[in-house]
Amino acid sequence: MRAMSNTILVAGATGGIGLAVCSRLAKAGNSLLLAARDAGKLQSLCAELSNTCPGTYTWIPVDMTRDESVDRFTEELTARNVILDGAVLMPPQDPPTNDPLPSSDKWREILQNSFVGPLALLKAAIATMKPDPANGRRSKIVIISGISSAQVLGHYASSNVIRCAWLAEAKTLAFALGDRGIHVNTLSLGGTLTPGYAASLERRAANARMTVEHRLAEETSNVPLRKYGTPAEVAVAVEGLLSAFSDHMTGLNILHDGGFTRAY
């Protein structure tokens, strides 16, 4: 895989997966524009990346769930004359729920937070991209989703819907933007040991009065690789989808689930 030197937007940069993605892309020599809610965390992350991987790291705070925040992000992005070569989008997710019929107000909230707002941010990012396929310059978008995009999970009722919406949007954008040299793919994650998920695993183990190792083995017994993924492994996959590896790939949903999904 050839080395990259591009400017990549990472939206959701300060989360467990976002941190791993930023670290991986910085080590590969990319310039990064970081976006997340907490300006202090963004500033600290830029400083940390600069200390470990000298390069260009900037940030713009944004709350993807609020239209006015996305509007301010868009204005700032335009004012800076940023040209993006790629974008990694991690839409906020609704907490797990077994309720297949949320109220209308709840659905509006879910759609705003997990789809409408993040899509507006993605639209702003796409507007800055200037690919030139004839000269080998392509722009890559990776939307990070979950395996309920491919296989319904009972305890992720609303996420089953939202994640499928992202697959449909990615496929639509792939058709609409392909001739411009803009690629749009989704990466759907199975269980991934982010700090938050690891903490919940520890709680489940304690409640079941068993060791974390025993609980982990029990939970992954239906995963062919017998393990959950790690943020670092997700970051490798993201890097690949942003690289020349995906020069003839768009509109795809890549499963990163250790083989859990049974469907062809």
Image: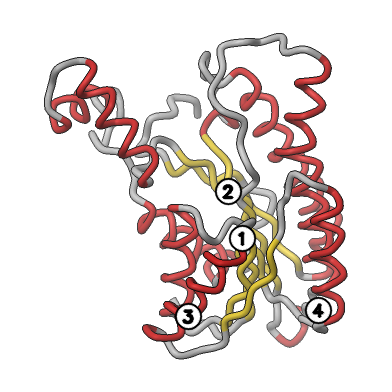
Image x and y of residue 68, in percent? 86, 53
**Disc 1 to disc 4, C-alpha distance:** 17 Å
Above or below, 183 against 64 in this view is below
Q: Residues within 10 Å of mark 4 (few under 14, many from 20)?
A: some
Split into 4 quadrants, where in the image is the N terminus?
Answer: bottom left
**Disc 4 to disc 2, C-alpha distance:** 23 Å
Q: Nearer the viewer, mark 1 or mark 4?
A: 1
Image x and y of residue 249, in percent? 63, 58
**Amino acid type at mark 1:** Val
Above or below, 27 against 111 in this view is below
> What residue is pinned by disc 4?
130
Whichever of callouts 1 and 2 sits on the residue coming sooner in the sequence is 1
Question: Of residues 158 and 85, which is closer to you in this image?
Answer: 158
Whichever of callouts 3 and 1 sits on the residue coming sooner in the sequence is 3
**Amino acid type at mark 3:** Ala
**Amino acid type at mark 4:** Lys
> What residue sits 69% from the left and 83% below the top?
136
* Left-right relation of 68 to 231: right
> What residue is pinned by disc 2?
144
Which of the numbered marks, if any, corresponds to residue 88?
1
